[in-house]
Amino acid sequence: MDLLPASALPSQGCNTGSNPVELLVYSTRSAPVRPFSLVFPIRDLFLQMTPELRKRAAARAFLLVDFEFTNLEWWTAVRQFPEKQFRGTAWRNSFPRRSAIPLTRAALMLAWQVTRMDAESACVLLGITEEVANIIESLQLTELDRIADRRHRHLEPRWADRPAMWRLMLSAALAPNPAAMKRIDAYGLQLLTVNLTRATTGERPTDVSHSRVSPHRET
């Protein structure tokens, strides 16, 4: 499969509104704001992230946010009932609205564009199932804007419940060897492929700590 260039992903942005790493670092450093639950186990690493390191950590070959991309039932309901509010399903540590809406819109626009260009690559790079990709591809741009505005609380960091994966990514960003980031890209893409397979077959999601793939160089 020919992968799309990482520069096509909105995670490449270096400002708070387009980079989830920036938002997580901001949450860590803002005392009046309660940090994301993802941040607590790896707070020390987030505090070390300089602007350059944040940019390096965000420059991944896969999308660093998720927007119900494996939840076919949710997307089917959103398409059929665009004005209906769905209670109790949004991520409880949602990004601030002023940042979440543009980041959600960027992720949806990317999914809409990339699925039309190369659906096979899009499913892996975005962590999106084929059925959900078909729904997003069928939507009008005005519908994507409305979804971003009304459903932005469903946007969450990729692997929001797996701090171990984020620890690996941030540690690789701190490493002087550029090969560390390449291994993280390979590792993340493998995990996304496994998770998509399990989402399609109805199996439980992959636990990073028990995955058979590894970002480390074999000895």
Image (cartoon, rainbow, N blue to C red):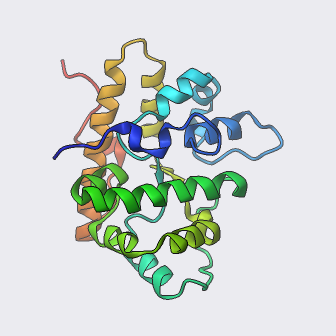
In the image, what residue occupies the spot 42% across and 31% down? 168
- Tell me, yes or no, if residue 139 can be seen here: yes
Give the left or right position of residue 137, taking residue 17 as reference. left
In the image, what residue occupies the spot 83% across and 42% down? 32
Residue found at the far top of this picture: 176
* Residue 194 spot, x, y in % from top left: 25, 53
Residue found at the far right of this picture: 32
Give the left or right position of residue 72, taking residue 97 as reference. left
* Residue 70 spot, x, y in % from top left: 37, 66
Which image quarter is the C terminus in? top left
In the image, what residue occupies the spot 48% across and 30% down? 57
Q: For residue 197, which quarter of the picture?
A: bottom left
Give the left or right position of residue 218, taking residue 44 as reference. left
* Residue 43 spot, x, y in % from top left: 62, 32
* Residue 58 spot, x, y in % from top left: 48, 35
Q: For residue 48, which quarter of the picture?
A: top right
Q: Nearer the viewer, residue 109 or 182?
A: 109
- Tell me, yes or no, if residue 49 can be seen here: no
Q: Nearer the viewer, residue 4 or 29?
A: 4
- Give the answer, above or below, for where 81 lies relative to 150: below
Q: Nearer the viewer, residue 76 or 141?
A: 141
All told, the count of numbered labels is 0
Q: For residue 149, which quarter of the picture?
A: bottom right
In the image, what residue occupies the spot 62% across and 64% down? 153
